[in-house]
Image (cartoon, rainbow, N blue to C red):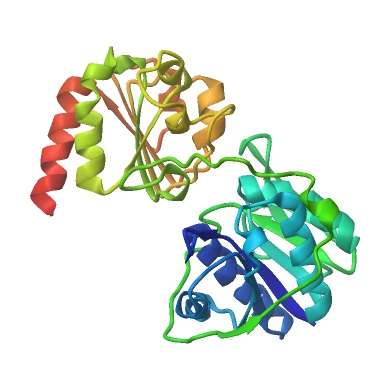
Amino acid sequence: MSVLIFAELDEGKLKKSSQEAIFYGSKVAGMLGTSATAVVIGTADQGELATAGRFGAAKVLHAADAKLNEPNGMAYASVVAAAAQQEGANVVVLAKSSLGDAMAARLAGKLKAGLAPNVIDLPDLSSGFRVKTSIYTGKAFAFNELKADVKILAIKKNTLTPEETDASATVEAFSPTVADSDFVLKVTNTEKATGDVLLPEADLVVSAGRGLKGPENWGIVEDLAKALHAATACSKPVSDLDWRPHHEHVGQTGIKVSPNLYIAAGISGAIQHLAGVNSSKVIVVINKDPDAPFFKSADYGIVGDVFDVLPRLTKAVQALN
């Protein structure tokens, strides 16, 4: 019996969300009195894989078959299912992501498992196996009791903050048989967002809307983001107008983020935008309209002109560095 964690790679490195998943899985393993094993798929350096031990994994199973280098939800689900069966895992943990979402239901079917998506806390084991999840785009919570022998937990970003140690995980080669039928879905091309800080992994996000009046004014947003070592984002109207690239669009139909700090400048706060950001730990809203709906969801609000406030914030941050 063990806890198995699927850890995603990005260019051969463990993703930050996967470090969080490993830490979460190790905490669940401790609660169950068992060990945590990570399964990693794709090409990666052995030393990098061993760093999973810093976040609580005792062992890493490495499926290094070259045909698995491209993320494929069908094939990856088969690999993780095989790892769970080999390890006798009764809990499988993965980070909620585009790849995780593509895998989770398939994995549940293969393992005849109970699935809890959007998990935001450690399970309650006092009377069964009960987990808290976020529902209705973060507007409410649900408590789910998982009764199947195998439980799959898809955790949201920032559910737990990892605590690193000096430990190192042992790494074992893992070569499961993957059926050709798992490759009927083929990844023909992958286009990745670029930048100093990538939005899905960012702890700090500076976002702006039509209040910036045009793409030529985006420098004040980028200046603050650079000072904070933050990612930049935008509202849907901004990406629709081609002021900013689509991969920066945050909202119900764009990227959903859960940073420690989300700064929204010149965004009114439509419900579709809130659906993508309301899992943020702290929301700061800057808008010259005191009646902007976003203020109702803000932890801190600044009523002022973004062209005045953002440069002042940037200078204040730079003075602290």
Q: Quadrant of residue 62?
A: bottom right
Residue 131 shows up from this direction:
no
Residue sitting at x 49%, y 36%: 277
**In-image side of 128 versus 138 (left or right):** right
Which quarter of the rendered picture does the N terminus lie within?
bottom right
In percent of width and height, residue 147 lies at 89, 63
**In-image side of 214 versus 247 (left or right):** left
Question: Is residue 177 placed above or below 159 in the rendered structure?
Answer: below
Residue sitting at x 62%, y 41%: 188
Residue sitting at x 72%, y 50%: 73
Which quarter of the rendered picture does the C terminus lie within?
bottom left
In percent of width and height, residue 152 lies at 77, 61
Residue sitting at x 45%, y 73%: 163
Q: Nearer the viewer, residue 241 or 137?
A: 241
In percent of width and height, residue 148 lies at 90, 64
In percent of width and height, residue 270 lies at 50, 19
Q: Nearer the viewer, residue 54 or 285?
A: 54
Residue 180 shows up from this direction:
yes
